[in-house]
Amino acid sequence: SLDREIGETGRLARILPQKGQLWLDRAEPETALPFFRQAEPLLDAEVEPRTALAIRHNLALCHAELGHLPHARRLYQQNQALYRRFTDRWTVLRIRWLKGTLEAAAGRLEAASEILSEVRKGYLEADRAYDAALVSLELAVLYARQGRLSELKTIARDTAEAFFSRRIHREAVVALAFFQQAAERETFTVEGLRRIATYLKKSRFDPGRPFALGTS
């Protein structure tokens, strides 16, 4: 509020996306979106290109998660010049993840599966278990839609094993054990897989949150 009052737009452009990121990390894109929208016009991309990239990418991501797919695709395409300026591992993985999500939404399931498999591998190699698990669940949804049950079972088993070998909170273990069991027994639903993914996002920074498939 003080930054708005004194016209400190540069600092405001850095504070707003931080607030947006907090909500996005908690799987609440509808709450995150206004913060990124407010921040985007306040920042000069030539002066602070990485911050501008984060804001614009997260805008596209919010729209994708909310199902506003034409808008998400348009933003993704508009960001290409800015994306090409950054080739570090984490930026590339995030960009490819969004690309895979958009390919899946467009019905290009084979292309989406290839991209998300690549992203999953990158996160596993970097020991980023939570991100790898989230990509794995997105892949599992694609495999379910394609009837690729053998691959779905393999990814569920591998994800659970990779996750259980790390020190993570108990409820996340329960969620991934449920994922593995549902895959093995072929009792999963696409909606159930998505609910597990939403739970993992919300519990990442709230380890006390209990897991229950019937709730988010």
Image (cartoon, grey):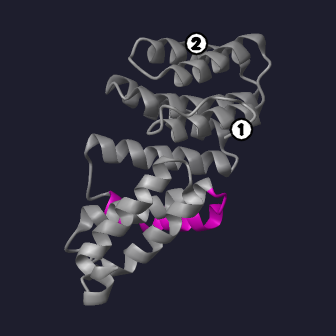
Label 1 secondary element: loop
Q: Is 49 or 37 nearer to us in this picture?
A: 37
Residue 27 appears left or right of 37? right
Q: Is 187 or 148 nearer to us in this picture?
A: 187
State the mark number for residue 215. Answer: 1
Which image quadrant for residue 48? bottom left
Q: Is 8 or 72 nearer to us in this picture?
A: 8
Farthest residue, direction bottom: 6
Residue 18 appears left or right of 187? left
On the image, the x and y values in percent for residue 200 come to: 54, 34
On the image, the x and y values in percent for residue 126 come to: 31, 27
Q: Which residue is drawn at 51% across and 19% down?
A: 170
Q: Which residue is drawn at 59% across and 62% down?
A: 30
On the image, the x and y values in percent for residue 22 come to: 42, 53
Label 2 secondary element: helix
Give the residue number, with chain letter if any, for mark 2: 157
Q: Give the range drawn in magenta.
A: 66-83
Mark 1 vs mark 2: in front: 1
